[in-house]
Image: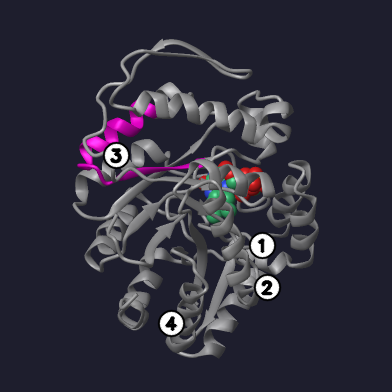
Amino acid sequence: MQTKKFKIGLFAFNASSGVTLTKDPKRWAPSWEDIKKISQDAEKMGLDFLLPIARWNDWGGETRPHKMAFETFSLMSSIASITNKIYLFSTVHTAFVHPIYAARASTTINNISNGRFGVNIVCGWNKSEYEMFNVEKKISSINRYKFGDEWLSIYLKLLNKKNDKISYKGKFIQVKNAQCYPKMVDEKNFLKISAGFSKDGREFAAKKFDILLTMFSKLENLKKNNQEIIDLGKKNNKNIQIFSPIHIICKNSKNEAQEFYDMYSQNKQDFRSVNNFISNLAWAKKDILASYLKQVKKQVAGSLGGFTIIGNKKDVAEQINEIYKSKTSGIALTFFDFRKDLSFFKKNVLKKIKRF
Ligand SMILES: Cc1cc2nc3c(=O)[nH]c(=O)nc-3n(C[C@H](O)[C@H](O)[C@H](O)COP(=O)(O)O)c2cc1C
């Protein structure tokens, strides 16, 4: 990825409904043509990265958000061959994808993209997906980061150019004489993101990753939160960067943006899928997050609880500036309609924040 201080990319463009839980008929429903177009447009306008969401099940309710989600290794491999500059991530679940497969898929895409590839590793949280793969709760919830740690050790050993065959005997995963070829064409440019929220999630990222992808709810607390994560990284001799998903509702006026947001996230909310999303968090022992989100159902429907900027072009640029000044290294943007709204964002906001 470029050495710019502040990176801007797109997140969750590969799944139906994007990050919304709404019955609005105009909700995002991407075809491959849409994804191709926004990937190439993102590259042309100078965005830094593309980060797909990894989903295997949906959120139920009337609209079943994420029912359609392009698989992230195969998708990014195709995007690699229709782009030249933009950095690509695949999102991979430690509990569902074997590290030997993940390593080989990663080095393959690293070759195809000429070193523009990294991974976003998720140790997971979704009950129905674990049931789908018949993964026991010990691994899915209680020990998710211990399992993730073993998975990561195997994965990194396989990527390492110095290693031919490797064996590993962990508590959860064992492999014997595993190998991974091709190796990467550019190891230095390989980035590892960990997406997490809990204390364990932060520690896991701060010890072993380049980037923590995490959420925040209030701009006022962001700088302090980010500093804590940066300090945690320093304790582990890591210069950890923090990326956050940011949902953008940008219209000609603040009123228009607010009305649009209220329409799809309140009036046309898919209540049942919102409730499913919140009860899933309670299952995954994320009680604090679950009880907070119960109070903000509209925010769950609006952006799956992620920070949302609602306003005109000036408001959006100002708040992005605040996020940058709070020591966030990258933002993964989401939109209601990635095609239309990204183009509006490019015309009206991007120039103002390019100087970062
Ligand atoms: C910005 C962001 C993106 C995430 N993307 C995915 C994803 O694509 N698929 C998925 O199953 N989980 C995803 N997760 C969920 C994480 O894997 C993790 O389980 C969740 O954030 C809870 O964190 P914790 O396990 O540290 O409590 C994401 C989380 C964050 C914060």
Disc 2 from disc 4: Cα separation: 27 Å
Disc 3 from disc 2: Cα separation: 39 Å
Specify which label sits upstream in the sequence, 1 or 2: 2
Give the position of the C terminus as an image quadrant: bottom left
> Looking at this rendering, what residue extends furthest in the top direction?
176
Q: Report which residue position mark 4 lands on.
A: 317
Does the rendering let one see residue 101?
Answer: yes
Residue 311 % position (x, y):
52, 84
Q: Secondary structure at mark 2?
A: helix
Q: Which image quadrant for residue 352?
A: bottom left
Residue 250 got which mark?
Answer: none
Disc 1 from disc 2: Cα separation: 14 Å
Q: Report which residue position mark 1 lands on.
A: 300
Labels 2 & 4 near each other (Cβ < 8 A): no
In reply to whether residue 7 is colored magenta, the answer given is no
Part of the protein shown in magenta: 103-121
Q: Residues within 10 Å of mark 1 (few under 14, many from 20)?
A: many
Residue 139 % position (x, y):
67, 28
Q: Nearer the viewer, mark 3 or mark 2?
A: 3
The residue sitting at 27% across, 37% down in the picture is 110
Q: Nearer the viewer, mark 3 or mark 4?
A: 4
Specify which label sits upstream in the sequence, 1 or 4: 1
Query: Label 2 sits on what residue type?
Result: Asn
Of 4 and 29, nearer the camera is 4
The residue sitting at 37% across, 51% down in the picture is 31
Specify which label sits upstream in the sequence, 1 or 3: 3
Residue 267 got which mark?
Answer: 2
The residue sitting at 48% across, 44% down in the picture is 209
Q: Secondary structure at mark 4?
A: helix
Q: Report which residue position mark 3 lands on.
A: 77
